[in-house]
Amino acid sequence: MKDRKQHVIKMAHQLFIEKGYQATSIQDILDHSGISKGTFYNYFSSKTELFIALCKSIFKQLEQYRNDLLTGQDPSNIEIFVKQIELQMKINRTNKLISLFEEVIFSNDAELKQFMKQGNLMMLRWVYTRFIDIFGEDKKPYLLDAAIMFTGILKSSLRYDSIAHDSTGSIPQVVRYCVDRAAAMVEEVSQTGDVLFQIETLEKLLPDCRIEDKSYQQALYQTVSEIKSALPDKEKEKSLELLDFVQDEFLQTQTPRKFLIESALRSLKAAEVCNKQKLQKLEQLAADYFRQIEL
Amino acid sequence: MKDRKQHVIKMAHQLFIEKGYQATSIQDILDHSGISKGTFYNYFSSKTELFIALCKSIFKQLEQYRNDLLTGQDPSNIEIFVKQIELQMKINRTNKLISLFEEVIFSNDAELKQFMKQGNLMMLRWVYTRFIDIFGEDKKPYLLDAAIMFTGILKSSLRYDSIAHDSTGSIPQVVRYCVDRAAAMVEEVSQTGDVLFQIETLEKLLPDCRIEDKSYQQALYQTVSEIKSALPDKEKEKSLELLDFVQDEFLQTQTPRKFLIESALRSLKAAEVCNKQKLQKLEQLAADYFRQIEL
DNA sequence: TTTCAGTTGTACTGATGGTATAAAAATCAT
DNA sequence: ATGATTTTTATACCATCAGTACAACTGAAA
């Protein structure tokens, strides 16, 4: 049944890419994925909820990719960041994500609006933390502004690029140019000392975890990724399901459910199919994280 | 009847601000402006055409304001530019323009899409020409990139500003910060020599007039504005109507109708209510413009 | 075989954008 | 003022769409 639901999401995604969100009727989705209306409304309470499910799955994929690019690399290496952005932008474009998001972002659906806003802020926070990796702690006061400017420049440039040389466009050049500009701006702004936004506001807007603790988030995510990629074939599916759940719970949920996660980790440990050392590290991290949360 | 139509636009605008575009039904507009459905579809062929009419009137107003700020001032004075941007952003925010535009920009309506795209490009072109005024001809190769980046930074910052400190926010600080960044970027980029976009692409996308001839556009507009503000009370309405038409035709229309404009100018001349010198200048400019066009 | 969750098909509701049209009202020319 | 013309109104109508309701079907577990 989960496959079926996923299948519906996939089919809907295809249609959204082809025809746009508004222009795709629920009937289209039903026809295209071969389910009945009843089933659809059994899976999703509305069209917007389907869309949110789709977004979540894309976000997760995006996050996966970008984290994969970082694993084992030097986080302060700006070339990695360039690659990460390039990849995300390419996925955006092939999936017509930007169009879809912008089409939907100011619809009359409050839930959707909130979700998209949150998504934007999460992207912003990611850029911010990466900028800290790249430009160093001492530039921190300027890096939220820099992240805001960078996302703005990137979006604007890509938009212009896609309407100027329609079709393919040349994402790498654009990304390179924007990253260079961001670097120069960090330099410039840290010399003049100009600061526009305080980081506290971002923390307030993303109350799910304190921004300073991104090390936990990232470390947790990375550790799970590492375990996943070193999984033996034996009982792979089951382990993957558990690990996916843990990863998802940490990333997507506002307040990860402590006992559920602990239970999942116990199961993994009992199955003895994971790298024991990594698993222990994961347990430690999770424990630290929860202790931190409780303060 | 024109008043009535304008009234409908106004009422629709109110509703759009209150409830958003999608959420406002035609019935709402009918009720709120006290006309019948038949009349509505006599005025506008569809809801989107009403929206376009509304946008046009707002654009015109915006253009009016920003040109008023410039008249009699030194175009290379960056403080004037700051004021112009501030004003436009304030109007944007009070009218919830950005929300409306973004809500609509990726709807399934091709006509609307094209219109909005064109609007964005016109804004971009305006920033570009103002940057030439401000940073000088020698920086020209970098100024399209700078304009694209500036609009991106501005949009991104204002967006963040409005969700961070919701309600009023502090537009002046944000604008100031963004303009400072733009200035620094022009400097930086003209030192490294990095260029991303060529101006020719913008020209191709806005075929209504060659970008190099913006002097005509601006001079035409400004001259008309000057004449308008020096109009005596005698037959003011009639003259204003003619002048408004001329201004509109030059600004909004792809190919201004030569004979109509010439006829309007003749009428104005015959009425002898305008500053004769300015009127002559206007005639000269128009003639030059049409000669230029025909090439 | 019974049970039961999940699925299907169909019919329905209510709202919407848009069309059609005949009657009423306002405008205009002579 | 009268008659012609245009504009406006009221109303009924159509097609589409999101979402609801529900009875019937299916397949697998108990």
Image (tube, coloured by chain):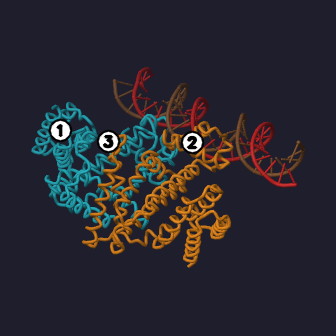
Chain colours: A cyan, B orange, C red, D brown
Q: Are marks 2 and 3 on the same chain?
A: yes
Chain of the residue that carries numbered disc 1 in the rendered image: A
Q: Position of residue A160 (x, y in %)?
A: 40, 62
Which residue is labeled 1 in the image? A268
Which residue is labeled 2 in the image? B11
| CA distance for labels 1 and 2 | 62 Å
> In the rendered structure, which disc, 2 or 3, sits on the residue that comes first in sequence?
2
- Please, what is the three-letter code of the amino acid marked with disc 2? Met
Q: Nearer the viewer, residue A47 or B35?
A: B35
Chain of the residue that carries numbered disc 3 in the rendered image: B
- Please, what is the three-letter code of the amino acid marked with disc 1? Leu
Secondary structure, mark 2, is helix
Which quadrant of the figure has residue B120? bottom left
Quarter holding the C terminus of chain A is top left
**Outermost residue toward the bottom in this view:** B295
Q: Position of residue A22 (x, y in %)?
A: 49, 47
How many discs mark residues in the rendered view?
A: 3
Q: Is residue B184 above or below residue A273?
A: below
Q: Nearer the viewer, residue A109 or A193?
A: A193
**Residue at the (42%, 41%) spot, across then down:** A50
Which residue is labeled 3 in the image? B165
Q: Position of residue B100 (x, y in %)?
A: 47, 47
Residue mark closest to the camera, 1 vs 2: 2
The answer to whether residue A1 is seen in the rendering is yes
| CA distance for labels 1 and 3 | 45 Å
Asked if residue A56 lies left or right of residue A127, the reply is right
Q: Position of residue A211 (x, y in %)?
A: 20, 43
Q: Residues within 10 Å of mark 2 (few under 14, many from 20)?
A: some
